[in-house]
Amino acid sequence: MRDRNTLVIIMCKAPVEGKVKTRLMSTYTAAEATAWHKAMATTVIERGKRLFHYVWLAADDISHPFFTSFEVPMYAQGEGSLGERMCSLMEQASQAGFEKLLFLGTDSPHMSDERLLQASSALDDCDIVLGAVDDGGYDLIAINHTYPALFSDISWGSEHVLQQSVAIAQKEGLHYLVLEESFDVDTPDMLMRAIRAGWNAPMKP
């Protein structure tokens, strides 16, 4: 049975050659890197749909044909920093009646079902759940209420994202949980690591 307690919001870039997974292009062509982006995004979106009843797809270009096959509500990410975009989506979700939210990117196709479900269920006891990754960021953030402060004054894309997020949670007096450290797929070696970790990639590296 799919989880009905949490809205999953998946942040995804449209698969435009030369604009996505550019760090893979040290080994792959722009077209191949784009194909990997599509494969990773598809895995993450389909997993979300399988595990959760409520899934939104937040894209930078909602008109891109790649997104039409997933049959989930589409939302424009809008302008601004990642934090500003997530905050805007959080507010839209709140207006739609959702309190518990789980934000995902598409860089962790190897993520286990258990990690996602643990994050959702932990919101019964925690205000915030963060999925630590080894580059200093997080692969998910789950919240049980609107907390705009969590998405401001963060050095997005740096190795300080998780640390800064935890510091904000502590300052705000919020009960938080940091999940076991995992990793995101940005480089060719991380792509191989994801496959070794169990991602059933639809194409060969």
Image (spheres, rainbow, N blue to C red):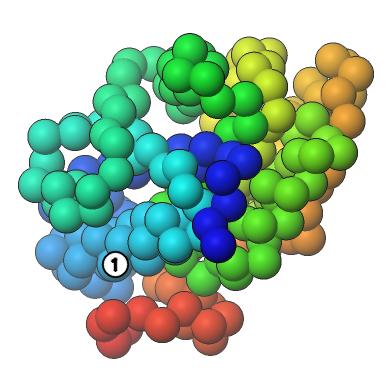
Please say whether residue 130 is visible from this viewpoint: yes
- Position in image of residue 100 (x %, y %): 63, 32
- Image coords of residue 133 (percent x, y): 66, 55
Identify the image quadrant of the N terminus.
Answer: bottom right
Q: Position of residue 85 (x, y in %)?
A: 43, 21
Q: Name the element at disc 1.
A: helix
Q: Residue furthest front?
A: 1
Residue name at image x 52 percent, y 71 percent? 110
Q: What residue lies at 79% left-to-right and 30% top-to-bottom?
A: 127
Characterize the local packing of mark 1: few (<14), some (14-19) or many (20 or more) Cα atoms within 10 angstroms: some
Q: Quadrant of residue 202?
A: bottom left
Q: Which residue is mark 1?
A: 39
Most foreground residue, 143 or 194: 143
In the displayed structure, 32 sits above or below 148; it is: below
Residue 103 in sight here = no
Q: Nearer the viewer, residue 154 or 116?
A: 116
Left or right relative to 183: residue 129: right
